[in-house]
Structures are given as C-alpha cells and as structure tokens.
Amino acid sequence: IDTKIYYKDVDPYTELDKIDKPIFIAFPSVSWEGDIAERNIIFEGLTSWLIETLCFFKKNPSIHLVIRFHPSESTLYNQTKEYKQGNLNIPLEYLIREKMPEIDEISNLSLIHSTQYVDSYKLIMEKMSVGLVYRGMLALETVFLGKPLILCARGMYSNNGLAYEPKSKEE
C-alpha cells in the first residue's frame, strides 16, 4: 500500500548526478521500529548508528553519504489516528537534527526527506556504490539488486554471508 501512495509522482532526484566519488546510501527504518534492544550489536540503537555514521562521513570527505529517510514517516504513519494523537515516535530526521544541528553543514551529505517522492530502488541501481542498512527488508532487496551492503544490526537475515556485518565500530 505504501508504494501505491508513495510512487504516484516520483522525483527524479538528480542531485547525485554531479557527485564523482563513491556514494553510500543509508536506509534507516522508522525510529520506533529501529530501536529494539535485541537487534543492537555494535550501536546503542538506530539513532546512535546514524549519528556515528554522520560523524564518520564528516571526517571522510572523499566519500559521499546519502540518507534516505523512510517514506512511511510521511505517508502511512502520519495518516493514522495514533500518529495524529502523538502516540508514535517523532520522525527520525527530527531526532537526528535535534542531536546534530550542524547536519546541513556537512558537505559530503545529501538528505532525502521522507516527504520526497524518490524511488529508492532506482537510487540503489543507478547511484549507489554501497548500501548501509541498520535493519530492514531493504537489506535483502539491495543484495538482490547486486549491490554491496553493510548491515549494522541483527536481523532475520543476519549471519548468512549476504552482507558485510562489522563486529565493531572501527570495522
């Protein structure tokens, strides 16, 4: 259902056309789904993973990071009674901006907001060098599309050799 709502007017998102360095794309889950303690291996949770990833890229300008915030944060979930009553967590982008107000000053960073109608699969196939997923189905889809993946949390498809799974933050 989400894709029917989401892909009605797709944005071609040409910003990445002018980037001539490796492009890593992070696909975080929605904030409330990504922070489940038993999934955390290296990081305290989804938010800490994304903040530390941003810090890493800020120190490494020879590579480019794209964060594609989950479209459900502005499609399905904002239409529910629970969201309107404030019973669902704040969208991840707001949490990240709160913890890292200088985010817009990172020169090798592109943000794709949950409100932007960008085809994630087209980004993977045409622009991405390496995928970064904390946990989510997009991890399997990325591997299926033939792209390398770094998986940073425990999931139902962990430890099967499909993705690189670091054992420490240094890796």
Image: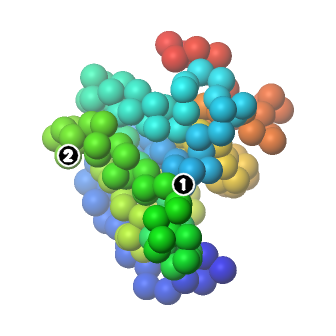
Q: For the residue carrying disc 1, how many other residues have a C-alpha within 10 Å: few (<14), some (14-19), or many (20+)? A: many
Quarter-of-image position of residue 117? bottom left
Residue at the location (53% across, 62% down)?
87
- Is residue 164 in view from this perspective? no
Q: Residue 115 in the image: state x and y as whole percent.
A: 38, 70
Task: Look at the numbered disc 2 and give the secondary structure of its residue.
Answer: helix
Front one among 41 and 150: 41
Q: Residue 155 in the image: state x and y as whole percent.
A: 75, 39
Front one among 114 and 163: 114
* Residue under numbered circle 1: 30
Q: Earlier in the sequence, mark 1 or mark 2?
A: 1
Front one among 37 and 149: 37
Asked if residue 100 lies left or right of residue 129, the reply is: left
Q: Are marks 1 and 2 in contact (CB under 8 Å)?
A: no
Asked if residue 112 lies left or right of residue 123, the reply is: left
Q: Name the quarter where the C terminus is drawn.
A: top right
Q: Is residue 5 above or below residue 124?
A: below
Quarter-of-image position of residue 96? top left
Colour mapping: rainbow
Residue at the location (53% across, 60% down)?
88
Q: Is residue 138 above or below residue 38?
A: below
Q: Residue 159 in the image: state x and y as whole percent.
A: 80, 28
The amino acid type, in three-letter code, at marker 2 is Asp
Work out which residue is located at the far bottom of the displayed protein and give it: 8
Q: Residue 97 in the image: state x and y as whole percent.
A: 29, 45
Residue at the location (54% across, 26% down)?
44
Distance from disc 1 to disc 2, alpha carbons, whole Å, reads: 21 Å
- Numbered label attached to residue 82: none
Q: Is residue 51 above or below residue 97?
A: above
* Residue under numbered circle 2: 104
Q: Name the quarter where the N terminus is drawn.
A: bottom right
